[in-house]
Image: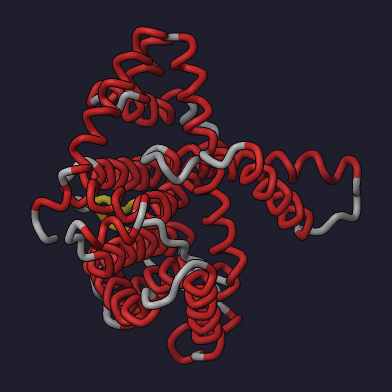
């Protein structure tokens, strides 16, 4: 078991394949447990969004409180194009991703002129505007009554309707998203992002085009959220604006903080912990507070967010990695040598004006 964990955390291909195999075998073992499958499907949706947000926060160093807006853009674009124009869900999904990227581009140009908390407030305002649009433009979105009759996805002539089928679909997207993010981080772009995250002044002096890379990561994170929203819409076949309100963006932020915004696997870890804790709270809280409403989740995760920022600012992924390194001293030495090599590569990022 130690070797398996080691492979995962040193970022090897074998570690990634191990995670993929576990996820692909899981529904075969629990094929009759629809509750577990639906829970894992939700984790898959959130993993996609969180992975994109991890790139933006952990590597570009920017905080976005508007991811729920892009999540909703993908969902409503797929829903509208498939029901009103008879477009294929796959083409509608692409249309939603393109629209989300375009909106992120338009919003990002002025937003990235701001710094620190002002940037977060700008994205929060954007999320509120989009939520109001979803709620008020009833001709397009159906308003608070919701959008009904969204068709399921078809793949190779097969209609994806059961949880068992959709599980594989969503996790193929989630794992592909993690792999894509991993490739970005290990590329020249990733080194540029790390330099920006470390010090914008130093990165600028090395010739790194800071605005360009921030904007690119913002657009990529928007595409991730949009794809997850499209998949969600075709999974539940009904959506309403309340699914994409401001609190949803905050929950996405909490997932990234829990998992660790400096780890590509942090999105998956954070989404898993968030969903599992949410399901556990639904079972435990009524035993102590019979008349408790859904607001207790907001209180609990708010407290959890504060505690994580104080005591585990690097998230669970980093803490697990530290435990593994203590248990496996040989791997620790190897990992440290890899880190030195990465830092040396990062130091050479200014060799070309990016």
- Residue at (30% x, 64% y) in the render: 214
Where does the C terminus fall, quadrant-wise? bottom left
Where does the N terminus fall, quadrant-wise? top left
274 with respect to 181 (left or right): right
The correct choice, above or below, for 115 with respect to 275 in the image is below
Q: Nearer the viewer, residue 324 or 79?
A: 324
Disc count in the image?
A: 0
273 with respect to 150 (left or right): right
- Residue at (62% x, 46% y) in the render: 309
332 with respect to 193 (left or right): right
Q: Quadrant of residue 71?
A: bottom left
The x, y position of residue 301, in whole percent, is 69, 50
The x, y position of residue 266, in whole percent, is 44, 40
Q: Nearer the viewer, residue 187 or 196?
A: 196
The correct choice, above or below, for 286 with respect to 30 in the image is below
The x, y position of residue 203, in whole percent, is 26, 57
Colour pattern? secondary structure
- Residue at (36% x, 10% y) in the render: 3
The x, y position of residue 63, in whole percent, is 47, 62
Q: Quadrant of residue 265?
A: top left
Q: Quadrant of residue 101?
A: bottom left
């Amino acid at each position: 078991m130690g070797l398996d964990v080691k492979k995962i955390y040193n970022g090897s291909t074998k570690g990634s394949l191990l995670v993929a195999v576990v996820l692909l075998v899981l529904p075969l073992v629990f094929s009759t447990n629809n509750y577990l499958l639906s829970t894992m499907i939700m984790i898959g949706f959130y993993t996609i969004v969180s992975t994109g947000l991890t790139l933006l926060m952990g590597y570009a160093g920017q905080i976005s409180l508007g991811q729920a807006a892009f999540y909703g853009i993908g969902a409503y674009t797929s829903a509208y194009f498939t029901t009103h124009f008879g477009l294929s869900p796959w083409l509608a999904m692409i249309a939603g991703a393109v629209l989300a990227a375009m909106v992120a581009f338009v919003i990002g140009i002025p937003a990235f002129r701001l710094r620190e908390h002002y940037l977060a407030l700008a994205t929060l305002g954007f999320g509120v505007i989009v939520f109001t649009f979803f709620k008020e433009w009833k001709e397009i979105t159906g308003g608070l009554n919701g959008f009904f009759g969204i068709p399921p996805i078809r793949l190779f002539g097969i209609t994806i309707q059961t949880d068992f089928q959709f599980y594989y679909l969503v996790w193929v997207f989630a794992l592909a998203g993690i792999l894509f993010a991993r490739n970005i981080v290990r590329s020249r772009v990733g080194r540029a992002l790390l330099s920006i995250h470390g010090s914008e002044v130093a990165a600028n002096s090395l010739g790194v085009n800071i605005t360009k890379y921030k904007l690119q990561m913002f657009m990529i994170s928007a595409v991730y959220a949009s794809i997850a929203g499209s998949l969600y819409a075709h999974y539940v076949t009904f959506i309403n604006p309340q699914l994409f309100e401001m609190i949803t963006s905050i929950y996405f932020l909490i997932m990234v903080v829990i998992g660790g915004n400096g780890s590509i696997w942090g999105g998956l870890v954070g989404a898993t912990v968030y969903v599992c804790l949410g399901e556990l709270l639904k079972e435990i809280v009524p035993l102590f507070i019979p008349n408790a409403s859904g607001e207790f989740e907001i209180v609990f995760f708010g407290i959890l967010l504060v505690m994580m920022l104080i005591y585990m600012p690097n998230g669970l992924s980093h803490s697990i990695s530290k435990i593994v390194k203590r248990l496996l001293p040989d791997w620790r030495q190897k990992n440290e040598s890899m880190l030195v090599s990465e830092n040396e590569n990062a130091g050479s990022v200014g060799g070309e004006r990016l």
